Image (cartoon, grey):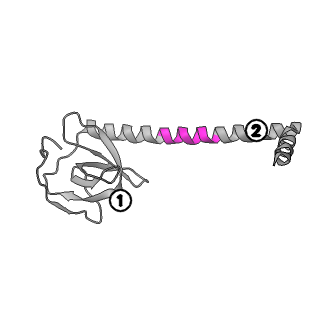
Amino acid sequence: MVPTVQPGDRVQVLAAPSRGPKRGDAVVFLGSTGDYDVLHRYLFKVPFLPYFVHRGDARHARVGLARSDRIIGIAVLESRQPSLRELLAGVALVARRVVRRIDWWHRAGASRRRDVDARRALIARGSLRSLVAHQRRQR
């Protein structure tokens, strides 16, 4: 959060309201491993998913994605509305992650379909049955 907060500065943190933080609030949340706390700006909640997009105040800070249940509280700092560029970067990050997940599902499904097709071909030729019978004889 440099330049807003310098390393080593103390920040007062209030409990997160039940409705969740507002856009531009400085939120404190558990890092990805849970070993450290992160102080970043809350950009927006991802629709239909338990995630939110965040970004630090540094000039070249990147946007990140974190689970909403990892929010510890809201820091007592001046709220700053994110720029359009920051919001678009967050939307692009979410889109990349969704496409990556869909691609993974597709590849996993294609792999399973290939395995099933290969087994069916072996069964049709009688090879799979002889392979299973051979493995049973080996035991």
Disc 1 from disc 2: Cα separation: 42 Å
Instruction: Give the residue at mark 1.
Output: 69
- The image shows residue 14 at horizontal and vertical percentages of 19, 63
Q: Which residue is mark 2?
A: 117
Q: Amino acid at mark 2?
A: Asp
Residue at point 29% right, 57% down? Answer: 71
Q: Earlier in the sequence, mark 1 or mark 2?
A: 1
Is 87 a magenta residue?
A: no
Mark identifier at residue 22 = none
Horizontal side of residue 116 vs 89, given as left or right: right
Provide residue 4's location: percent of width, then percent of height.
12, 44
- Closest to the observer, 98 or 121: 121
Q: Position of residue 126 (x, y in %)?
A: 88, 39
Q: Which residues are magenta?
A: 99-109
Q: Is residue 132 left or right of residue 52?
A: right
Q: Nearer the viewer, residue 22 or 6?
A: 6
The residue located at (67%, 42%) in the rendering is 112
Q: Is residue 114 above or below residue 133?
A: above
For residue 4, side relative to residue 85 (left or right):
left
- The residue positioned 20% from the left and 46% from the top of the image is 81
Nearer to the camera, 47 or 6 = 6
Identified by mark 1, the residue type is Asp
- Local crowd at mark 1 within 10 Å, few (<14), some, or many (≥20)? few
